[in-house]
Amino acid sequence: MFDGDKGVGKCGTADGYYCGGGYVDRMYFEFAPTKLAGKYVLDATFRAHETWSFNCDPHTVDLVRTDNISEGTRWPGPQQLDLMGDRSVAAGRGNLCSPDQPDAWIEFNDNPDESNENLKNTVRSFADGKMSRLTLMLRAHDEGDPRAWKRFDDSAELQVVFAYKPGVPTSVGVIPGSGTTGYCYKSSSDPLMVTRKDPMVQARVQTLVEAHKGDEEGSLQAEYVVERGDDADWHQVWTGHMPDTGWHPDETLEKMRTSDRADNGLYRYKARTQSHWSYAGKSGDLWSSYSPWCYFKIDSTAPKAPRITAGSPYTECTANVCEGHGSPGIAGTFTFQPNTADIDASEHTGITAYQYKLLSTSAKQISGTTKAQVKDVVPPLSGTQVLSVRAKDVYNRWGTPAEFVFKVTPAQAETGRWHFDGVPGSGTLTAKDTATVGTRHDATLKGQSPGWSSRARRGEADYSLRLNDYSTDPAQRTGYADTSAPAVNTRDSFTVAAWVQLTDASANRVVLSAPGSNNSAFALYYSAASRKWVFNRTDNDSAGPAFIRSVADQANPSLNVWTHVAGVFKTEGDDNKPDADPGNDTIQLFINGQPQGKPLQLSKVASSYTPWAATGGLQFGRALSGGTYGEHHVGLLDEAAVWQRALDPGEIVAEATASQDNVPANELVARWDATSAKAGEVPESSAYPLPSMKLAPAGTTVNEDDNALFLDGTAQYATSTGPAVDETGSFTVSASVRLDSKALAAKPVGYQAQIAAQAMGGESSWALWVIKPAADTYQWKFTRTAVDSVGKVTQSAEVPAADFAETNTWVQLTGVFDAQEPWEWTDPSDGTNTETRYGKIHLYVGEYDQASDAATFTAPQQGSGELSLGRGTAGGSTGHYLPGGVQELRIWTGAMNFDQIRTQVLGISDSI
């Protein structure tokens, strides 16, 4: 329960800031919340090492919280905010005093007899993420008295006694029968059917933040609540907790059987984590939020868990053996039969249907049979998979689910991958093929001035292929790269994918293609005619082929943003088994991991279609048509890959995360930093071509002392032109903001101010907000909004902060849209049919994820036009002015996780 952190000191005098010798009027120590994430502060002590005092008599030293410091800070220093404590001390004069006064550590800790000392509560707010940095100042209480002057080392310690904050438990569910797996059905109209009157509930206790992965942390219990809702309004009927006595560390799965419940009763269950602490003769408890409700119904006569047996190719895992078979996309055969308890003495059973699904796929149903065999269970990914099956009887009752656990062998990896990691100016003209399957096919840069760029999808220290954006003359735009031999057999199933940044949309722009003698067997490209991304195949390699196109759902893709494009050619049937009939061949385009339309059956579009194999090398940035190469790409290409198989949609989603070592990569694509403001604007300092933020109206300026844009909340703002990212894919936005309490207090209850936003007609595609729900109460939130062709809102999502916002201090707000994050959608019309969908938003206050189960967003919405600080657009009007300051706005392609927020946004290193 004890932790410490180091602070870096800066010394202040009327002449400036320095560290080292000289008389010190003021000294500043700045702390990052490195080790305080997820901790509840019980006590805090600040320690500084005094090395010299003007005389032997004690004089009072104040410890004061101030605004943050920076390279631009000048005397008299940042604003002083609150007294943390004071000490009357003298140390460091050695034998000049009697008795000796050696160097000494001076400790500041709240004195209970002095109500104005506030160190513990301030550090607690700091740990809660309500401020991004904690700056403490040491000063003489009487700065006009030279006898009070002292000298301290330029380091200090902040020692904290803490308890682990509890997190919402995971693995929350009900075990319906005598099995071991818990289920959580989230619809009261489709509850989990439980055939025992005393079902078991489970929850895995969690700390809010896992400080050291794998370590046992916290003193935790799981608390369970069950309510009943069929006999009256929902009311509590049972509670429990585990362990019964004592405490367990995080990640412990706690299970407990309820007392008997009423047969045919409808119930719901939730759980939360309790964290216990004791310190200095006191003890207390902290509770997490509750998990979402899990609905279940007790029906002892409902169908029991059905029997499941496997055919080819998968086998059931046992306690000791779990062998992999098949691969992602390969269908398995399974047979379902009634539980023996549901068969009477005459061998009769009332089972009429089965519903089955993998835990990561949508549910399917087979009806009209007591015994059923299905051949369409298709695992989307490798590794351990769980098939869940439940039976329905003649009374239309779904029963308890059964589970079948099996393992899927990893699919064949890509047969070609090109990172395009040549260094600009190196003279390198080869892009290495880094795949490990099959023959390597390095690509060679050719044509007019192809090269490399430091603007690349995987972030800092990565590079990409730069093509043809040096000139506006079409005759000069001939740069490309190619392999010397085919990298993929286009007659058989294949997948191609790449990250692309389009700079010029005035003509067709090819990403990848595979040529024959006259034409390309396929092309993945931007079509200027349709203003959409396209994946096509030609019916043959003749002089006048038919083009068969799978076209993107959305037109007018944004320029100068990173987009993931992929094309899948599939010769197998729905069960992914070999199919020699070309009439079943299909193609499909994917954008940012999402399928565009349905798979297109080639023979239905062109009866002349015949699958044919390209004979030329893979082309990056151009295509062959009518015997002539052209349609050269203008912009950047990165992370291209090919597979000699049709990837499953789930694998396409995984590829679109641009993961490195199982961590999604990101790239900073926009940064406006008020520190560099000049002449009425804030320059954009990333490597990407985005304009400066213009300050408006005239007279709006940057505060040089704070290096921040301070806005009056009435008319002042800053604006640029976006978008900075492809908002149909994943992205991250972050702003450093400070609320003006006085200006906000004058605003009416219900006032909403936008901190940063991307416009989209009369709404904002995304926005960071502060709202005023009540007097002197403020709350952060992050939103996403989608509109139709006439500007009507069709979908929206928001994540509000869990705690109220602090005013008059700098806070780092980060909004994340993860286009590849899965969630389970339930059909509201019947509460039974489910499917996996993708897209969730997150808000981080400091390093804390303000999680919300409801924050799902699936619309492929793209904003454009005004990208602003301090105002925004919503409800058809522009306004929502911010009363406060903004230091910086940064935008990344890619969805950041908790660790990336800490290191890349907040600059926190666990080694500090």
Image (tube, rainbow, N blue to C red):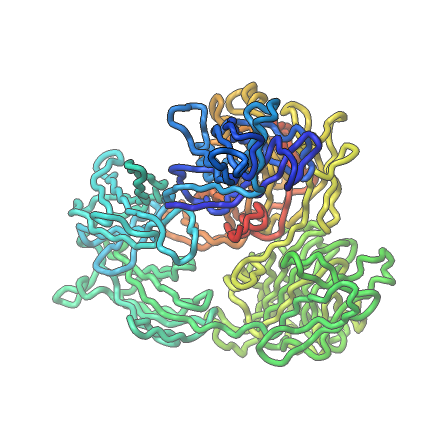
- From the viewer's side, name the closer residue of 327 and 307: 327
Q: In the rendering, at what x and y percent does residue 240 appear?
A: 22, 44
| Vertical placement of residue 564 versus 322, above or below | above
Toward which corner of the image does residue 234 lie, by quadrant? top left
| Vertical placement of residue 881 versus 484, above or below | above
Residue 422 is at least partly visible in this image: yes
Q: How many marks?
A: 0
Q: In the rendering, at what x and y percent does residue 250 appear?
A: 34, 52
Report the side of 273 relative to 665 (left or right). left
Report the side of 668 relative to 355 (left or right). right
Q: In the rendering, at what x and y percent does residue 125 appear?
A: 46, 35
Q: In the rendering, at what x and y percent does residue 530 appear?
A: 71, 54
| Vertical placement of residue 573 versus 717, above or below | below
Residue drawn at point x = 46 percent, y = 66 percent? 381
Report the side of 629 relative to 511 (left or right). right
Residue 737 is at least partly visible in this image: no
Residue drawn at point x = 85 percent, y = 60 percent? 474
Residue drawn at point x = 63 percent, y = 25 percent? 713
- From the viewer's side, name the closer residue of 546 and 339: 339
Report the side of 157 relative to 218 (left or right). right
Residue drawn at point x = 65 percent, y = 36 percent? 22
- From the viewer's side, name the closer residue of 401 and 778: 778
- From the viewer's side, name the closer residue of 39 and 878: 39
Q: Which residue reaches farthest top?
A: 746
Q: Quadrant of the N terminus?
A: top left
